[in-house]
Image (cartoon, grey):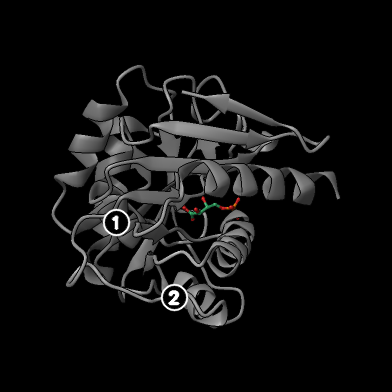
Amino acid sequence: SPLESAKQAAAFKAVDKHVQNNYVIGIGSGSTIVYAAERLAERVSKEKLNVVCIPTSFQAKQLIVKHDLRLGSLDTHPTVDVCIDGADEVDVNLDLIKGGGACLLQEKIVASCANNLVIIADYTKDSVKLGDQYKKGIPIEVIPMSYVPIQNKIRNRFGGDVNLRMAVAKAGPVITDNGNFILDWVNFKQSDDWNQVNTFIRMIPGVVETGLFIGMARIVYFGQADGTVKEQI
Ligand code: DER
């Protein structure tokens, strides 16, 4: 499908351009990264590359193991040469909404340890402002016992709605890889200063992390429906 070939094109381009021998590579989460893991495995075996892969979720860990890639951790590799990850939406400043897959906490930690954060996305993620296209809300990971007061505080300060993300294949709320809940902040007013919004939300006791990745991405590869790739820096 055009969407899948877009994801694959972005993923292959990023791996081909940014992966070098002896690299420590952060492996993101979601569906686009699956193509990146495939391409990485192909390059490792063809070029006999020596790399270590740091997962950002149970899903990423499974991908690394499935492709016989060397599994590492921040304990032994606290500095990551490049982190390759997806995004739910990208604005013109390369600010991101992430967390559609509820993996934002470890994604942001690994991204923060990386010398370079490379985002791979299909054309549906390519927006002018956050919120133009992605309507599922800004994900926020919270400690379960605090989710109601956090919902109230965000709604009172910024408006919009703040919904507890309910599971599909499990009764009750989604539980993250870290044992927390996810709130999705929808119908938010588009901000010109996401840093200020992000800081306010992160300071609410019980908030663990937000899906606002502000000033973190260095380059974004947008796969197009025709299989070409648009770079944005
Ligand atoms: O949840 C996440 O942050 C993922 O990276 C997600 O945003 C990317 O999802 P996709 O590659 O399946 O579109």
Q: Residue at x 37, y 33 (%)?
A: 159
| Mark 2 neighbour class, 10 Å CA radius: few under 14, some 14 to 19, many 20 or more | some
Q: Residue at x 26, y 36 (%)?
A: 198
The vertical placement of 204 against 65, above or below, is: above
Q: Amino acid at mark 2?
A: Lys
Residue 222 location (% of width, % of height): 62, 34
**CA separation, marks 1 and 2?**
13 Å
Q: On the picture, is 222 further left or further right than 176?
A: right
Q: Residue at x 28, y 54 (%)?
A: 80
Res. 88 visible in picture: no
- Residue 135: quarter of image: top right
Q: Amino acid at mark 1?
A: Val
Residue 98 location (% of width, % of height): 45, 47
Residue 179 location (% of width, % of height): 31, 76
Residue 116 location (% of width, % of height): 33, 41
Mark drawn on residue 110: 1
Q: Secondary structure at mark 1?
A: helix
| Mark 1 neighbour class, 10 Å CA radius: few under 14, some 14 to 19, many 20 or more | many
Q: Secondary structure at mark 2?
A: helix
| Residue in front for this viewpoint, 117 or 198 | 117
| Residue in front for this viewpoint, 154 or 190 | 190
**Ligand 1 contact, mark 1 (Cβ < 8 Å):** no
| Residue in front for this viewpoint, 127 or 185 | 127
User: Tag 2 or tag 1, which sits nearer the N-term?
Assistant: 2
| Residue in front for this viewpoint, 111 or 68 | 68
Res. 115 visible in picture: yes
The vertical placement of 97 against 178, above or below, is: above
Q: Residue at x 40, y 74 (%)?
A: 175
Mark drawn on residue 145: none
**Ligand 1 contact, mark 2 (Cβ < 8 Å):** no
Mark drawn on residue 61: 2
